[in-house]
Amino acid sequence: MNYKKIVLAYSGGLDTSVIITWLKENYEGCEVIAVTGDVGQGENELEGLEEKAKKTGASKIYVLDLKEEMVNDYIIPTIKAGATYENVYLLGTPFSRPLIAKKLVEIAKKENADAICHGCTGKGNDQVRFELGVKAFAPDMPVIAPWRTWDIKSREDEIEYAEKHNIPLKINRETNYSKDKNLWHLSHEGLDLENPLNVPQYDKILEMGVTPQKAPDKEEIIKLTFEKGVPVALNDKKMSTLDIILKLNEIGGKNGIGILDMVENRLVGMKSRGVYETPGGTIIYKAHELLESICLDKETAHYKQSVADKFGELLYNAGWFSPLREALSAFVDKTQETVTGDVGLKLYKGNIISNGISSPYSLYSEQTASFGEDEDFDQEDSKGFINLYGLPTKVRSKMIENKK
C-alpha cells in the first residue's frame, strides 16, 4: 500500500533518523510528520531535532512536553502499586511507551494521516507497547515497522545507510549502545553488555550518577513526605512529584543509588541483558515500601504484593490500557487512602537505610509490640489461639499415629 501521510515516532536517534529517509524512498510521494515526546530525556537529546527531522525529509515535527502527564498518569499509579518487573526492574521504558502511542494517534487523527510508523526492532518489547497503544485508540490504523521489513539487519548497517545518505548522527560504532532515557531512568544495552560474562564498564556508561565506590564517604539524610501514596514533599519542602523525582535523581546519583545490571525475560520470549540507572525512583520505591509497612494491615499488604507483581507484568507486557490494569489501579487507590506520612532515609554508597517512619494512620502500637504490660493483649489468650490454630496439625498427627 502506498501511504500518503505517515506519522513517525521520532527520537532523533539512529533508528528514526534513518527511517525518515527510508520512508521517503519506499513510499513514493509520502509526507512524513515526526512526533517527539519530551519525557525528560534532556536538552542534549532534544537539541536540533526540528532542523534534523526536516533536513532528512520530514515536512513537520511536533515536540510534545509529556513529562507531567507521564508522572501523573503512569508513574504515580505504579509507585502506589509498588510494581516492578521480575522483582527488580523499575519499569522506566514501559512508562513512556503507552503515553507516546496515545499521542501518536492524536496527531495522526489531527493530521488525517493514514499510517503510523515506529523504529522498534522485531526483537524488542517496545514494538508491542507502541502497537497495542495505537490499537487502544485507533484499532484500524495501519502501523509501519521498518525493522520487520527492510534489508537493514544491524545497527552497523544503519550507520552505513546513514553515512551513505548524509544523515547526521550523534553516535559512532564505538559508542553505539542502545539507550533509552527519560525523567525516571536511563537504560544501556548492546555492545559488550550483550555477553552476561562481561562486567559493565560503569565509568564509561553511567550518566545519571556514580558507582558506590565513587560516592561520598559521608551519608546524606533526607525526608520524603507522602499523601495517599504520592510523594508531595522533600525535606519538608512541598514540590510536584516530577520535581521530587528530578531532585532525587541528582541526590541519588551522586550517592551511587539505583544502578541495576540484570538479565530479563523479554515479552517476545528471549533473555536480554541491560544496565539501568534509576536513582530517584529507587529512593521513592524504598520510602513508599517503608511507609506502607506501618500503614497497611497484614492481609492487605500481603495481597497487594501479588497485585504489584501482576501490575508490573502488565505494564512491562504492553497491558497498560487493559481492563485488568485499570481494575488493579482501583484496588491500589483504595489501599493508599491511609499511606500518608514521613519517611527518613540515610543514603550511603549505594545503600538506602531507614531513618525513621511516622504516619497519622500508623497501625504500629508501641504498647502492643512492647514486651511490657499491654492493656489490649492478655497473654493467656494465646493458649486458646494456639489450640484452635493448631487443630488441623493435631488431627492429622493423630490420624498418622492411628494408621501405624
Image (cartoon, helix red, strand yellow):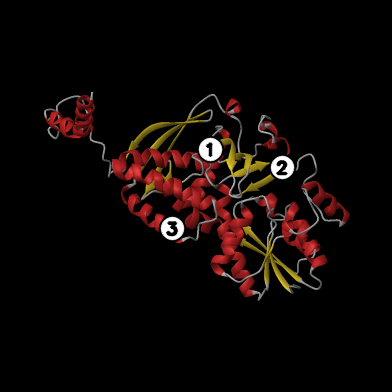
Q: Nearer the viewer, mark 2 or mark 1?
A: 2
Q: Which residue is mark 2?
A: 177
Q: Residues within 10 Å of mark 2 (few under 14, many from 20)?
A: some
Q: Which residue is mark 1?
A: 251
Residue type marked 3: Leu
Q: Secondary structure at mark 3?
A: helix
Residue 204 position in % (x across, y down): 70, 34
Residue 355 position in % (x across, y down): 39, 31
**Residue at the image point whose x is 61% and y is 59% from the top:** 130
Q: Nearer the viewer, mark 2 or mark 3?
A: 3
Q: How far apart are the alpha carbons under marks 2 and 1?
A: 25 Å
Residue 181 position in % (x across, y down): 63, 48
- Residue toward you, 237 or 119: 119
Residue type marked 2: Tyr
Q: Quadrant of the rendered structure where residue 196 is?
A: top right
The extreme bottom residue here reads: 112
Q: Residues within 10 Å of mark 1 (few under 14, many from 20)?
A: some
Whether the residues at callouts 2 and 3 have beta carbons within 8 Å, the answer is: no
Q: Which residue is mark 3?
A: 324
Q: Secondary structure at mark 2?
A: loop
Disc nearer the start of the sequence (2/3)? 2
Q: Quadrant of the rendered structure where residue 296 is?
A: top left
The answer to whether residue 248 of the structure is visible from this angle is no
- Residue toward you, 221 or 208: 208
Quadrant of the frame with the N terminus: bottom right
Disc nearer the start of the sequence (3/1)? 1
Q: Nearer the viewer, mark 3 or mark 1?
A: 3
| Left or right: residue 273 compared with residue 19 | left
The answer to whether residue 27 of the structure is visible from this angle is yes
